[in-house]
Structures are given as C-alpha cells and as structure tokens.
Amino acid sequence: MRAMMTTPPAFPEQTRRDFLKTSAALGAALAAPAIVSGNLLAAANADTLRIGLVGCGGRGSGAAAQALKADPNVLLTAMGDAFPEQLQKSLKELQGDTEIAAKVKVAPDHCFVGLDAYQKVIASGVDVVLLATPPGFRPVHLQAAVAAGKHVFCEKPVATDAPGVRSVLATAKLAQEKKLSLVTGFCWRYDFARREFYQRLHDGAIGDLRAVYATYYTGQVKPMPPASARPQDMGDLEWQLRNWYNFVWLSGDGLVEQAVHSVNKIAWAMKDQPPLKAIAVGGRQTPNHQGNIFDHMFITYEYPDNVRAFLGQRQISNCANENSDYLMGAAGFGKIPGWQAPFLQGKETWRYREPKAGAAPPDMYQQEHNELFASIRAGAAHNDGAWMAHSTLLAIMGRMAAYTGQEVTWEDALNSKERLVPETLDWKMELPIAPMAIPGFTKLA
C-alpha cells in the first residue's frame, strides 16, 4: 500500500522580521469574529457535527472522547489508523465509555486502515477532523484536511522539521481564508490558571521580563526494543512506525514531542516573539537500540535586549524529576510549580485560586475542544496556526543547536532545508535508520 506524502510548496527565505509581520498579520486577522457568507462555515448551522479521528493511539482516543463531550449534538462517524488492532482497541474503549457511547457511530465501512487512512477519513463526510498520529505526518494530514474544508483539532507538535513548519504556516493561512477553525493540542494555553498567570505577567506584574528557566525532567518514554525483537517479515517502515517515538522524523525527539509544552510556555511568556538565536548541549546517555533521538538537552535562547530563556530537558529513568517554570522580572518573580497553582511575587503577591466548588472550569484538555466546537457553532473561526507553528519551530531550533553543536539563528531554523520526513511511504520500502547526531560533526542544513 502506498500513500503519497505531498511535498510542501517551496517558500522564499524569511527573516525574523518577516516572520513577525506574517504571524502578527495572521493573528490580527484571526482575532476578529469570522463573517459567515455563502457556504463558509456551513457546519456552523448543521444540526449534527460529524467527527473523524485520524490516529487511534491513547492521545487520539482521549481527543475523540473530549470532542464528543464538547457539544451536545456531535457524532464520531469515522476512524483511521495505520494498524487495524490499534483502531479496534480505540473503538472498543470509546464504545465502553457510558458518557459518550451513544455518540460513537462508526460503521465497519468507516474504519479505515493503512497509510492512506487519513484521506479516507477526510473524504467520509465528516465536518471536523482530529489529527493525532505521530507528528511527522501532521503537515500533510493538516494540509489535506483544510484543503477539503474541514475544521481541525491538531495535536502538538505540528511538524518535525522546518519544511513541515512552513507547510503548516501556509495551511493555517488557508484555514483563515476558508474561515475554518484550527485548534491545537498545546493544552496549557487552554488552562485557566496559566491564562491568568501569563496575562498578569504581560500586564507588568513583575516588570520587564529578564529571564525564563523551564524544566522538563522526566523518566524514559517508550523505550526502543532491541533489533532482535523485530519480526523477520516486518518491513522498515512498520518497525519504525510501531516504535515511532524513537525516530526523529516521526516524533521530532523528546524535546520536540514532549518538552515542546515547556517550549510553548517560554514562547507564551515572550509574547510569541521569535528569539535571535539558540545554543545548546545534549546527547544520548542510555542505550537506544538503533533509535536516533537524544535523551537530554539544555538550550539557551537569546532574545532582544539581552533577555534569555533556558530549557533543561531529560528523559532518563531513576533521576530527579521536575516540570516547572521560573520567570525572573525586573520587579519580581513568577513560578509555575508543575501542575500546582502558579504565583507571582512583585508589585503585589498573587496566587491562582480555583473557583468555588461547582464553578470550577473544565480541565485544559476538555477546554480545547469546548472552544473548538463553540467557535464552529458561532461561525467565528478560531485559529491557533501562527503560534502553534512558532512553538514547534522554537523546539526544532533547540534540537538543531543541540544536534549540531552550532549556534542557530531563527532564520537558520525557519529556512532550514533539512527534510526528515520521506516524500513517499510504502510498507515495502527500504528506510534506513539515520545515524545518531554527533555535535561538532552533524551539519546544519
């Protein structure tokens, strides 16, 4: 079976200033409510919104459940995955959830399997598409969904290389033109506590921001099995897909796939202004059995006016863990201590307080979908495109600096010609595993 991976269009080289102008224009245009005319946002007036899920792993199943809880009149009518057993497992779990079981209406002929399953889901008559495959596929899947006029929930990150990010930026602009909603899985931006924290920060609660230190120190994720565990009849592509987290082209690596949440909070603190450059250290401490991702990195991002952001990322078992954010301002200090309530100490002391019982907001994962479906119903397109692409590229930029050992500018990252994702995929194709990067020897592309 073959699935054509559409090559993203060529893009002229961009500078940091160009990116700021483009993202600011896109953001400003998307801040205003969409004007509905003709068939634009036709689903906004439909009695029932039909949902299609692409990527039936744990995150995809969770997204489907949240989408079905976000609106009283929605149905899950199509599902797609590369592997049949994963799809059936997800379908069984969703059908077993008593809160949403009545909304799961996926007929056998709407269970699509294979590398082209996303195309079949999109063409199955759905109004909203949930994209939750390994992120290497995200640019092509997003492009196809928006081109077909579908509203989209798009998991993070949105690409694993710079050509993919440029493709996503173009698709986000197309979604704007079509007045389609595009919501991302950068869940912290939908958390009420963090929203209030960053709003106060931007309003000057601790003065001018001088530095950010973010930590993402966790245990090992999805260990790579040894080559001896691979069945003799399993092709290169299937082996890599079944162990997708361990390959840079599929996951982006631990920084781009996981710690990108912390990168995104750095971007949020900096009002999504691109940095000037980044420098980093990193490597692989634990055996990876032919995978090619680093398991630790430390990145320094330099912003205008000598502002710095630091990110420590490590995914090694039996080590001290932390996932917090420290923000230093000219007139105070702020902290987000893991999943606890954030606080600020500056002109005044503030700590987020949950509303009284019965009035607590939905969790951030649910809120993403609540806002997506509310925007569709209102005919007011919601579009996260510019900043979700920015945060993804910020992570890729850090990875580039760590993998090469070089100083990487924003322009280097944005205009990189390093294409990690194959343009065509076939179950029988030869797909050699790229060697692990070696700082000082691996070149910037």
Image: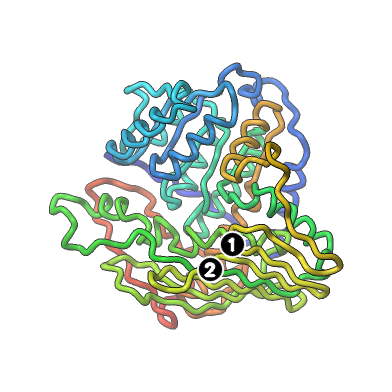
| Label 1 environment density (alpha carbons within 10 Å; few <14, some 14–19, many ≥20) | few
Question: On the image, numbered disc 2 is attached to which residue?
Answer: 322
**Mark 2 element type:** loop
Decide which of 288, 390 is in the foreground and name it.
288
Decide: is 164 above or below 228.
Answer: above
Q: Residue at x 31, y 33 (%)?
A: 88
Decide: is 36 above or below 222.
Answer: above
- Amino acid at dot 2: Glu
Question: On the image, numbered disc 1 is attached to which residue?
Answer: 338
| Label 2 environment density (alpha carbons within 10 Å; few <14, some 14–19, many ≥20) | some
Decide: is 213 above or below 341.
Answer: below
**Marked residue nearer the N-terminal end (2 or 1):** 2
Residue 43 occupies quadrant: top right
Q: How is the image coloured?
A: rainbow
Q: Is residue 88 left or right of residue 181?
A: left
Q: Is residue 371 visible?
A: yes
Q: Residue at x 39, y 29 (%)?
A: 96
Distance between mark 2 and mark 1 Cα atoms: 7 Å
Image spot of residue 123 (x, y percent): 44, 27
Q: Is residue 399 visible?
A: no
Decide which of 77, 115 is in the foreground and name it.
77
- Amino acid at dot 1: Gly
Decide which of 107, 408 is in the foreground and name it.
107
Image spot of residue 280 (x, y percent): 53, 77
Q: Is residue 53 left or right of residue 387?
A: left
Q: Quadrant of the N terminus?
A: top left
Residue 70 occupies quadrant: top right
Q: Is residue 15 left or right of residue 113?
A: right
Image spot of residue 49 (x, y percent): 56, 23
